[in-house]
Image (cartoon, helix red, strand yellow):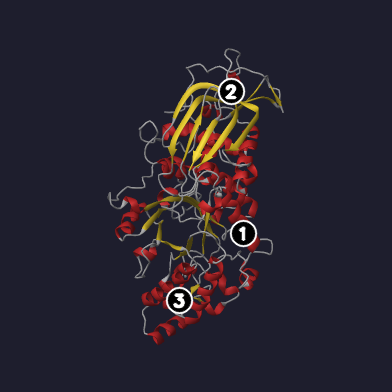
């Protein structure tokens, strides 16, 4: 790469210059000076030999150094920053970024630096993601300080977004990396909510490991903390479980469309290195028809017709929850899966249980009669056994809202409830004292708006249409309808992609940059650093910027407006 000794001057004040950070820090001070990135730029951890830095933090440092030179993102102004390259005043040149981590309590200087992964694998409410950042305007060393390696990672993510590339005279490969708003000071930035997630369904259609990793990279760019992996469902069981090899052998779409134990470990490790915990979901007792391919004895109303009377989606089939043998099988299966996952959250689903399926299943009715239990009592016993097994593996249970609102099921006090049917139901869950993760279909479902996918329903809308635009999602208020006392029950939220009409071919474009919206809602909170409320108009130029940066990194995020508009913030407003 050839670097030119160019000088940089400020743009004309007639051009609106957007601070491009996403999510925007909760406090931010910035100047108007330009600063070059030195060809000899380096990142060092204060007081620690690089060989003693944890491997995942070394990896994060290496990625940042590479991205600073390889992003090559031209600033979103007419000319893409070429007008910045005017010889008028000599800017400073940054050659060093120092990372400083506070020693753990009771330990002084020289203490071992903890890994990013060790912080990610703590309980969701116990992780420390805070950091402070200072980039002087004169080229003096920049600094990120944090209490954890995870905090340093978040600071590096902010630092990366400050820099742009400008070429000279259209000569490919010649130019500078620079920032245009030095000095930058971020003091004690930290998330408003610890859970900032994205859910991907890999059962309706299969997504290879590279697609999942690319998604994790994009999630990390916007400081997301949770990957909710809805890995299996009634249509397919792509997850290999060594204790139950027959499930994937007979339940996966093909031999090539499986996740091996090594694949899962690889994804979990890859995610943790990028500040993301993996929350796996095995949805029971509904959404389990695929298990009948190898264990038909455990499934009620298998392929019952018409399916719409027995399930929310084809094919029909649910676990025989009143059967002791089925409960034993389910506990063994969930235990085998949960024991291989290092995170502290695990979801057993629990949504869309079809009672008609059980009413017309002779074996379930026989089991209920012999036990003297009602269906709800049997569900309570079944769920209790499964949840006990999950907690026995050191994990908090996550369920969909029906478990808390529609069934008489005993749930532990630390159960996390995902609210999906309607955003209004969060208040009902909070009233019961459970922690809430917002996943409302009326704001955060990314699959809505493509029309109905049922084969003989041409021209009709799906149940959750219309399309949930980024603007709609951005207006979501996590505390709407909650009392002041209930606010502490909100852990955060996530956007979701159910994959009936999605596959690797459209994954990026349907998810990004829309899914970045919830990342900012739950990191930044309701107000910008200026004290003003977040707004769609202020957010758009910054969302453009993170979208273009994603594209530079190989994520095929969809355009939000014509390029003409993206280069001229505000000029396409009505």
Q: Is residue 115 above or below residue 350?
A: above
Marks 2/3: CA distance? 63 Å
Query: Horizontal and vertical percent for residue 110?
Result: 55, 45
Q: Tags 3 and 1 in contact by the CB under 8 Å rule?
A: no
Q: Is residue 446 left or right of residue 37?
A: left
Reading the chain from its start, which is encountered first: label 1 or label 2?
A: 2
Picture residue at 61% right of the left edge, 59% below the top: 265
Element class at badge 1: helix
Q: Which mark is residue 265?
A: 1
Q: Which quadrant of the figure has residue 45?
A: top right
Reading the chain from its start, which is encountered first: label 2 or label 3?
A: 2
Picture residue at 47% right of the left edge, 81% below the top: 324
- The residue carrying mark 3 is 321
Q: Do we see residue 506 in this rendering?
A: no
Marks 3/1: CA distance? 30 Å
Q: Is residue 393 above or below residue 569?
A: below
Query: Horizontal and vertical percent for residue 181?
Result: 50, 25
């Amino acid at each position: 790469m050839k670097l030119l000794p160019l000088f940089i001057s400020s743009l004309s004040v007639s051009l609106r210059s957007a601070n491009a950070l996403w999510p925007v820090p909760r406090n931010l001070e910035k100047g108007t000076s330009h600063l070059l990135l030195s060809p000899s730029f380096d990142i060092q951890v204060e007081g620690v030999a690089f060989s003693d830095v944890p491997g995942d933090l070394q990896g994060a440092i290496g990625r940042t150094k590479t991205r600073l030179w390889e992003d090559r993102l031209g600033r979103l102004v007419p000319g893409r920053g070429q007008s910045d390259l005017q010889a008028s005043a000599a800017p400073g040149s940054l050659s060093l970024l120092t990372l400083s981590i506070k020693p753990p309590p009771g330990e002084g200087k020289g203490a071992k630096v903890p890994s990013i992964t060790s912080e990610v694998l703590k309980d969701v409410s116990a992780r420390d993601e805070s950091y402070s950042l200072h980039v002087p305007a004169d080229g003096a060393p920049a600094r990120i300080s944090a209490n954890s390696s995870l905090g340093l990672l978040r600071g590096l993510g902010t630092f990366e977004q400050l820099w742009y590339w400008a070429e000279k005279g259209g000569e490919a490969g010649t130019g500078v990396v620079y920032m245009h708003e030095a000095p930058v000071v971020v003091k004690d930035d930290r998330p408003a909510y610890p859970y900032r997630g994205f859910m991907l369904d890999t059962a309706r259609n299969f997504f290879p490991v590279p697609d999942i990793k690319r998604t994790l990279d994009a999630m990390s760019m916007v400081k997301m903390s949770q990957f909710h992996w809805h890995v299996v469902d009634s249509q397919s069981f792509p997850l290999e479980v060594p204790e139950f090899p027959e499930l994937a052998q007979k339940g996966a779409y093909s031999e090539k469309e499986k996740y091996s134990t090594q694949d899962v470990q690889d994804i979990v490790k890859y995610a943790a290195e990028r500040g993301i915990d993996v929350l796996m979901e095995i949805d029971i007792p509904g959404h389990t028809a695929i298990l009948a391919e190898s264990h038909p004895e455990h499934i009620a109303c298998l392929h019952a017709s018409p399916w719409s009377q027995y399930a929310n989606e084809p094919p029909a089939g649910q676990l025989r929850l009143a059967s002791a043998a089925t409960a034993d099988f389910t506990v063994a299966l969930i235990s085998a899966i949960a024991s291989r996952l290092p995170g502290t959250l695990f979801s057993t689903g629990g949504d869309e249980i079809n009672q008609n399926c059980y009413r017309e299943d002779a074996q379930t009715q026989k089991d209920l009669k012999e036990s003297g239990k009602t269906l709800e009592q049997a569900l309570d016993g079944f769920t209790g056994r499964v949840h006990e097994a999950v907690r026995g593996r050191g994990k908090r249970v996550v369920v969909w809202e029906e478990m808390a609102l529609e069934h008489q099921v005993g749930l532990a006090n630390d159960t996390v409830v995902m609210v999906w049917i309607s955003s209004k139901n969060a208040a009902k869950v909070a009233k019961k004292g459970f922690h809430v993760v917002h996943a409302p279909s009326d704001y955060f479902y990314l699959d809505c708006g493509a029309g109905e996918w049922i084969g003989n329903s041409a021209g009709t809308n799906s149940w959750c249409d219309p399309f949930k635009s980024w603007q709609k999602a951005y207006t979501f208020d996590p505390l709407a309808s909650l009392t002041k006392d209930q606010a502490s029950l909100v852990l955060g939220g996530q956007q979701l992609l159910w994959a009936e009409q999605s596959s690797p071919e459209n994954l990026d474009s349907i998810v990004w940059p829309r899914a970045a919206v919830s990342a900012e809602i739950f990191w930044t909170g309701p107000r910008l650093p200026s004290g003003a409320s977040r707004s769609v108009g202020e957010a758009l130029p910054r969302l453009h910027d993170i979208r273009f940066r994603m594209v530079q990194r190989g994520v095929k995020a969809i355009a939000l407006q014509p390029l003409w508009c993206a280069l001229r913030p505000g000029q396409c407003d009505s």
